[in-house]
Amino acid sequence: MLKEQKLEICTKWKLKGQRNQEAQILCFLPKAQIWDKWHRTLGHIHMGAVKYLYKSNLVTRMDVDEKSTPSQCPTCIQGKSHAMLFPPWASDQDFKLAELITADVWGPVNITGTNGAHYYFQFMDIKA
């Protein structure tokens, strides 16, 4: 149910032919959104968390159509899917020392290193 005195959109408009008259203000009450819309708006958080925020009245102007049923979010499903890290043929190869080296960069960080650095670089030999 919509709460009283909540306004979503207010638009000033004048009727054609009106002169020197104050513009009329047209206001619409907000339309209650479905659960899925709030799930996306709040950064794809768990549906239980969305319902908790609504029932606890922790988000202002959060109107939900309680009759709507949440659906499976394709973006969340795709984000949780797993992919193979390496192709199958890579596990059969035997690398020699210093033949394959990986690198990783971490930063920037708020802590300054002894030489003034704000990044951490790591190089690792796969064979080692």
Image: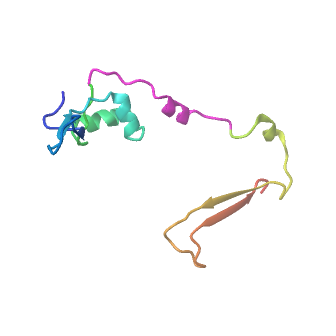
Rendering quarter of residue 8: top left
Q: Does the segment drawn in magenta span residue 75?
A: yes
Q: Is residue 24 left or right of residue 98?
A: left
* Image location of residue 55, percent across then percent down: 23, 34
Number of numbered discs: 0
* Image location of residue 97, percent across then percent down: 84, 57
Per the rendered image, the range of residues in magenta is: 66-84
Rendering quarter of residue 29: top left
Task: Classify the position of the N terminus by image quarter.
Answer: top left
Q: Residue at x 24, y 33 (%)?
A: 30
Of 86 and 70, the residue lying toward us? 70
Q: Most prominent secondary structure in the magenta stretch?
A: loop
* Image location of residue 37, percent across then percent down: 37, 32
Model colouring: rainbow
Q: Is residue 43 above or below residue 117?
A: above
Q: In this view, does 112 lie to the left or right of 26?
A: right
Q: Which residue lies furthest to the bottom in this view?
A: 115
